[in-house]
Image (tube, rainbow, N blue to C red):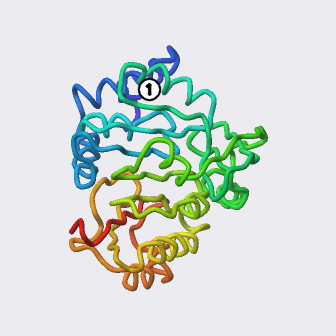
């Protein structure tokens, strides 16, 4: 309705203009979580317990880090974007969080990183970017390219220890990140993007299933729902059937979401 003042939007714009928006969100998540934040905390409590080590691969401004800290976990977070890295270092300087200014992939190397005008869209994947340009984000810009050091999940485990949970959100580069993992962690998640990279979601499940020799089960959560899609966890056969169907692109799975995988011993 025209003429109604959106105070929430004004508040967010003001905080962003002052450069303290991420700091406010993290404070809110810890002290006065809204319903969305409470759902996020509830979802991750299925995987994270006090004292656990978590990896946040693609941390951005740290909403998942804040959630893991609410659950009393320790965190190793990767974030290759300089501005986001600086915010993370500032906002979590007094917490049990290690911030690493690198990307993750299949091998240790240096790779082109396409920095978007919206930090949520920056990516190592040209295929992801082309898909976004032809869809909902055609007005965004990825013209800035930086050389960024890539590490692997195996290398992180060797340096920091075995995590109980790994969250992977790397804007179309998730399969390459999974290829750098040869250890069977208790649980992990990876982001899917629709419709342009729906096939990659199936490839990610295949990679996980191969690593775990099929002894793993799956669930999903669309975009910011923070609720499991399936009432009961499913095996790879059922999930792959869905991911390879047209239904995956057309039936309430959002523009993006997360696939969760856990070892059968966790059920």
The number of numbered discs placed on residues in the rendered structure image is 1
Q: Which residue is situated farthest in the top direction here?
A: 18
Rendered position, 82 above or below 218: above
The residue sitting at 39% across, 68% down in the picture is 252
Quadrant housing the N terminus? top left
Counting from the top left corner in percent of width and height, residue 251 is at 41, 73
Counting from the top left corner in percent of width and height, residue 123 is at 65, 48
Query: For the residue carrying disc 1, how many other residues have a C-alpha within 10 Å: few (<14), some (14-19), or many (20+)?
Result: some
The part of the image, by quadrant, that contains residue 69 is top left
Choose between 178 and 12: the one closer to the eye. Answer: 178
Counting from the top left corner in percent of width and height, residue 234 is at 30, 77
In this picture, residue 30 sits left or right of residue 246? left
Counting from the top left corner in percent of width and height, residue 104 is at 59, 49
Quadrant housing the C terminus? bottom left
In this picture, residue 193 sits left or right of residue 223? right
Q: Determine which residue is flagged by label 1.
A: 22
In this picture, residue 57 sits left or right of residue 105? left
In this picture, residue 12 sits left or right of residue 134? left
The residue sitting at 59% across, 67% down in the picture is 197
Choose between 258 and 186: the one closer to the eye. Answer: 186
The residue sitting at 46% across, 71% down in the picture is 208
Q: Which residue is situated farthest in the front direction here?
A: 158
User: Label 1's element?
Assistant: helix
The residue sitting at 31% across, 40% down in the picture is 68
Choose between 48 and 241: the one closer to the eye. Answer: 48
């Amino acid at each position: 309705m025209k003429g109604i003042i959106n105070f929430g939007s004004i508040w967010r714009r003001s905080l962003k203009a002052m450069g303290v928006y991420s700091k406010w969100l993290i404070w809110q998540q810890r002290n006065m979580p809204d319903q969305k934040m409470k759902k996020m905390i509830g979802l991750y409590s299925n995987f994270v317990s006090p004292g656990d080590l978590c990896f946040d691969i693609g941390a951005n401004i740290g909403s998942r880090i804040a959630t893991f800290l609410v659950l009393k976990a320790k965190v190793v977070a990767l974030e290759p974007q300089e501005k986001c890295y600086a915010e993370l270092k500032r906002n979590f300087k007094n917490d049990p969080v290690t911030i690493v200014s690198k990307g993750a992939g299949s091998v240790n190397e240096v790779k082109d990183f396409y920095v978007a005008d919206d930090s949520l869209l920056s990516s190592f994947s040209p295929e992801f970017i082309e898909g976004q340009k032809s869809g909902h984000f055609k007005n965004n810009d990825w013209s800035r390219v930086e050389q960024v050091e890539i590490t692997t999940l195996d290398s992180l485990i060797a340096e920091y220890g075995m995590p109980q949970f790994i969250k992977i959100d790397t804007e179309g580069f998730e399969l390459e990140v999974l290829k750098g993992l040869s250890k069977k962690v208790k649980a992990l998640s990876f982001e899917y993007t629709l419709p342009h990279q729906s096939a990659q979601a199936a490839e990610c499940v295949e990679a996980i299933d191969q690593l775990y020799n099929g002894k793993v089960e799956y669930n999903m959560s669309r975009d910011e729902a923070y609720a499991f899609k399936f009432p009961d966890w499913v095996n790879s056969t059922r999930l792959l059937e869905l991911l390879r169907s047209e239904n995956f692109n057309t039936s309430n799975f959002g523009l993006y979401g997360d696939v969760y995988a856990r070892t059968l011993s966790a059920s």
